[in-house]
Structures are given as structure tokens and as C-alpha cells.
Image (spheres, rainbow, N blue to C red):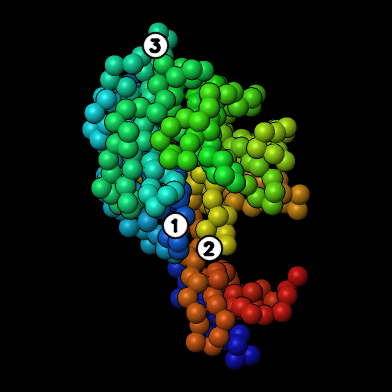
Amino acid sequence: MKKLGVIYSLAAVACFAANPLTTKFYSADAAALVYHDSLFIFAGHDEQGPQGNNNKAFIMHDWHVMVTDDMENYHDYGAVLSVKTFKWANASAFAGHCEYRNGKFYWYVAVHHGTIKENGSEGFAIGVAVADHPSGPWKDAIGQALVTDNTPNDVKLNIDPAIFYDGDDIWMYWGSWNAGRRVKLKENMLELASTPEDIKIKDFFEAPWMHKYRGNYYFSYASGYPSTTNYSMAPSINGPWTQKGVINDKLDNSETNHQAIFKYLGHWYFMYHGANSPGGWTYRRSVNIDYLYYDENANIQKIKRTTTGVDKVNNAPLAEGGFRIAIWRLKTKTASWCSARRMILPMPSCG
């Protein structure tokens, strides 16, 4: 009974994050990077005005980086990267993805190219910024775009880059307007190692994201417009891909759906943007995080969007011994001893 009292005491001081993560600025298209024990969030910045007929466009000039160590308290480093970092670009700080390699952080972002634009395209290109830390300072890694409208077998809208490591192979995925591509990168992260190839996902629209779980490969993406988030599943990075359907439904007052799926401190999370900040709408979005669950066959379950967000995670050692790996919500004092026991390790199995 003494142990049970300790556990209820822990539950009483538990506090929970809320969605959206911040209302200090409008944020969108966020990507996640787990580095050591910290979670870094790389987010676009919506600067459009209030909803109205004259404001129907994305206005985005820079990107923010936020960091958390417990999924409750977030520190915003501010607008650490902007379109102006890339001298060859002239507008539109669209979605990006950052990864760590070779002692550096590489941030792949989509921007309008200042001079390269093919007929029928919007002139988007993918650039690479590099830094020693996510907070910056960031600089243009190669002084030119990595992918442009002149890249062989590119797409008309070269946006939404996403990096995925598969063993020693480094892959970059991107695309929009129902056309997606992937390409291998060289070890230096700054050059294409192959010709881009079609991802061959039938209901793909944009926002590619790759992750792996229990030997399975998962390709998630925005489908249709207004978009849902769908996913396909395969035993290999090369397929064959089985379409699994919708995991995040259309959003209220936001036409776009853009996700990141990641594991942090033992939990799986689904990060997405919505229009749920005061004054939010399609062009003024905000980043949210909710839990992602799998079933016994490793299929992803439908995301349950919440206003409360996810629980605080605390891995600090306890004076009584063991480690607190998660704060579970014990809603009543009649919660089972087995449910309560799960909060402290080591302990016998509760099934």
C-alpha cells in the first residue's frame, strides 16, 4: 500500500501539454528530429493575415526551431533560418526536414528559385542549410539548389523534402500535385547519388514521410485536396506497397495535412498542423502532437486528435529505485494496482 501511495502522489503532480504546441506564432509543416534526449521540431511560419478573400495564399519567409525534453515544455529558438539564407532563392519558406550526420545538422527546405522556372511549374527548388546545432547559425551548405526544375525526372512542384536512412543508404523523398520522387544522396548529404525515381504510390498528393517499425516500412503522405493523411506499408523500402488508407481525417478550416511520425523516449507520436489557434485558418496553421498507435499486426490506428495533447514524459530516476518512464493518467483512486505498477520499473509483467 505504501508503494501505491507513492504512485498516486506522482500522478497528482502530473501535468499535460496542450494542442497546439504554441500560440505565439502560426506554425506548419513541422518535422521532428530526436537527438540524444531532446526532441527538436523544425516548423514553417505562417504569416498570412485573417481569413478573407484577399488573403488566399501562403505567406512564409522563415522557419522556427523548438526543442523539448519532456513533451510538455517547449523552448522556441526563434526564426533561425530564412529564405534570405539562400542567395539564389527569392520567396516561400515551405516545408523542410532536418537530419544529423557527420557531426553536422542538414536542413532540407523548399523555396522559390530566383531564376530557374520551367513552364507549368511554380519554380520551387530544394536547398540545404547546415549548422553545428539546430539553433544555428545556419548557412547555405552548397551555394545553390540541390533539386530544381532542371533536375532530371523532377516534378512540377519540388516541395516537401523528407530524409530517410535505410542502413547505409540515404534517401530523400519529395513532391506534390500527385507526383512524388525519391533519390539517393551521397554520404556528404550535399549531392544526388542517382537519378530521381517515381515513388509509385497511387493516392499520393504531397507531404511524404518515411519511418520503420518492427521490420515494416511505412510511407505516409497527404492524399487528395483538401487532404487526409494516408499511409502505405511494405516489407522493403522498394515495396511492394500495400495501401492502408486514412489515418488522419480532413482538418477543420485547413485544406492541407502534413505529418511527421517519430518515436521519442519510448512513445510513438504523430505531429501535424491544424487551424486550431485563435484566428487560425488554411493559411494560418499551428503544430499539434498526438499519440500514434499500432495494432497487433503493426497497422497504424486512426489518429485521435485532441486538445489536451500528449502526457509529459519523465525518465528521471526515483529515490525509491527504478525509473519513471511515463506519467499515466490515473483518473480515480480505484485505478487497478496493475495499471499503477506500470509507472515504475523494474516490476513484474502486467500483461
Circle nearer the viewer, 3 or 2: 3
Q: Is residue 348 visible?
A: yes
State how far apart marks 1 and 2 are (Cα): 11 Å
**In the rendered structure, which disc, 1 or 2, sits on the residue that comes first in sequence?**
1
Mark 3 or 2, nearer chain start: 3
Q: In this view, does 328 lie above or below 287?
A: below
Question: Who comes first in sequence, dot 1 or dot 3?
Answer: 1
Residue 265 numbered tag: 2
In the foreground, 228 or 345: 345
Which quadrant is home to the C terminus? bottom right
Name the residue that disc number 3 marks: 118
Q: Which of 261 and 138 is in front in this view?
A: 138
SS at mark 3 in the image: loop
Give the residue at x 59% y 51%: 292
- Give the class, few, some or many, for how many residues have Cα within 10 Å of label 3's Cα (few <14, many ≥20): few
Tally of numbered tags = 3
Neighbourhood count class around disc 2 (C-alpha, 10 Å): few under 14, some 14–19, many 20 upward: some
- Amino acid type at circle 1 is Tyr
Label 3 and label 2: CA atoms lie apart by: 45 Å
In-front residue for pair 78/126: 126
- Residue with the mark numbered 1: 35
Residue 135 lies, in percent from the top left, at 30, 52
Indicate the position of residue 96 as horizontal and vertical percent values: 41, 37
Instruction: Tell me the kind of residue under disc 2.
Output: Leu
Residue 159 or 177: which is nearer the viewer?
Answer: 159
Check disc 1: other Cα within 10 Å, few if <14, some if 14-19, many if 20+. Answer: few
